[in-house]
Image (cartoon, rainbow, N blue to C red):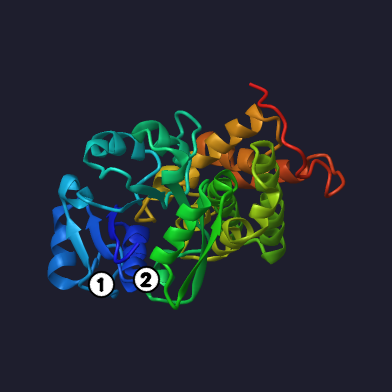
């Protein structure tokens, strides 16, 4: 695909950062923004000062407020909006999608009302076949990527040639993409890590140490691997960039929205006040209940996800919730580990 035309739908921090990558890789990029002032800033000043201050965008990135013009003729459409709004937005955008455009999700969340992964929502709303739906996930903190610091990611699509094409579309000297056909595994890694990052942030807010955080990361990875396995994914995917890699980055970085939300919850703030301290959506708020529901559906124990959901949505005291988590019966570390997929127990 020579100099492909890319539409990036969403001008938040990750959408803007990925536009930097695409432009550096030689693509012609149209960045759709909901707000006219962001469109004007990008086109007139070559920057997005609200979401990515200090980062200059190449001339190959042009901003657009009209979704029809942004999507016209796009070879690849990148979706970088909230997971809870994508269904409604896509329903409006679908008629403007160019025939055969490949739909790429940057979203690391689940639809709260249905429990569907983003690739499933995209396919259902647009009717796109699996060879036209891909997801990007990995340890990709947006600002570091926008500043062109070395990073790696995973591009997953059921169709390997499509994944390989997308790999070429976004490869730069500082951004190294790997391919996978395990879409479910890659997405589950991105969803669960946000929930575990909230837990890690809560621990930091409570003044707990690295032992606590390491235990949360490791056992959180186990929860993700067990859930992915019973959903038909390859557990090995969760040992890679889209699983362990993303989990470590999000749980340990103060630049993570989910970690930051957890930090303020750990400091004792109620959810609404904690959310006021972050500028964008923390997907873990919605994903914790969706992950909890998936665990119940597939008979997989998800104690950390359940604890986070209790703190966020039921108002549980973080210290009491942590004490309850630690008081669970002890067992062999590998008991109940990833194994053959089992049937949905709904």
Front in this rendered view, residue 81 or 53: 81
Q: Is residue 85 left or right of residue 173?
A: left
Residue positioned most to the top: 346
Q: Residue 39: x, y in percent?
A: 16, 59
Question: What residue lies at 46% left-to-right and 36% top-to-bottom?
Answer: 120
Q: Nearer the viewer, residue 337 or 254?
A: 337
Residue 38 on image: x %, y %: 19, 59
- Residue 14: give its label: none
Q: What numbered label is drawn on residue 146?
A: 2
Q: Is residue 294 above or below residue 106?
A: above
The crowd level at tag 2 (other Cα within 10 Å; few <14, some 14-19, many 20+) is many
Q: Secondary structure at mark 2?
A: helix
* Quadrant in which the C terminus appears: top right
x and y, in percent, of residue 108 in the image: 47, 49
Residue at (65% x, 53% y) in the render: 238
- Mark 1 sits on what residue? 57
The reply to whether residue 315 is in sight is no
In the rendered image, the vertical position of residue 231 relative to residue 220, given as above or below = above
Q: Residue drawn at (16%, 50%), measured in percent from left and top?
A: 69
Q: Earlier in the sequence, mark 2 or mark 1?
A: 1
| Image quadrant assignment for residue 3 | bottom left
Residue count near mark 1 (Cα–Cα under 10 Å), binned few <14, some 14–19, many ≥20? many
Residue 168 in the figure: left or right of residue 296: left
| Residue drawn at x 42%, y 53% as measured from the top left | 106
Q: What separation in Å lies between label 2 and label 1 (alpha carbons)?
A: 9 Å
Q: Position of residue 301 (x, y in %)?
A: 71, 36
Q: Quadrant of the N terminus?
A: bottom left
* SS class, disc 1: loop
């Amino acid at each position: 695909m020579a100099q492909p035309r890319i539409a990036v739908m969403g001008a938040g921090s990750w959408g803007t950062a990925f536009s930097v990558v695409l432009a550096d890789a030689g693509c012609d990029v149209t960045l759709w923004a909901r707000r006219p002032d962001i469109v004007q800033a990008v086109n007139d000043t070559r920057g997005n000062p609200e979401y990515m201050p200090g980062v200059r965008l190449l001339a190959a990135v042009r901003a657009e407020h009209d979704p029809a013009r942004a999507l016209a003729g796009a070879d690849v459409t990148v979706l970088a909006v909230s997971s809870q709004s994508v269904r409604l937005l896509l329903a409006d955008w679908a008629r403007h999608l160019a025939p055969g455009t490949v739909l790429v999700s940057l979203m690391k969340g689940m639809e709260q009302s249905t429990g569907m992964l983003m690739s499933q929502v995209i396919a259902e709303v647009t009717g796109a076949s699996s060879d036209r739906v891909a997801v990007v996930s990995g340890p990709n903190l947006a600002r570091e990527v926008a500043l062109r610091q070395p990073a790696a990611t995973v591009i997953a699509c059921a169709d390997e040639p499509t994944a390989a094409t997308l790999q070429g579309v976004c490869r730069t000297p500082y951004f190294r993409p790997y391919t996978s056909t395990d879409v479910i595994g890659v997405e589950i890694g991105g969803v669960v890590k946000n929930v575990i990052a909230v837990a890690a942030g809560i621990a930091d807010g409570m003044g707990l140490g690295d032992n606590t955080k390491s235990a949360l990361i490791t056992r959180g990875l186990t929860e993700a691997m067990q859930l992915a396995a019973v959903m038909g994914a390859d557990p090995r995917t969760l040992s890679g960039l889209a699983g362990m890699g993303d989990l470590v980055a999000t749980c340990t970085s103060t630049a993570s929205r989910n970690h930051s939300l957890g930090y303020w919850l750990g400091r004792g703030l109620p959810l609404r006040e904690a959310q006021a301290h972050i500028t964008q959506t923390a997907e873990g708020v919605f994903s914790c209940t969706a992950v909890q529901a998936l665990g119940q559906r597939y008979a997989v124990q998800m104690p950390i996800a359940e604890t986070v959901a209790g703190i966020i949505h039921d108002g549980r005291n973080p210290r009491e919730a942590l004490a309850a988590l630690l008081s669970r019966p002890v067992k062999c570390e590998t008991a109940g580990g990833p194994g053959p997929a089992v049937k949905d127990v709904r």
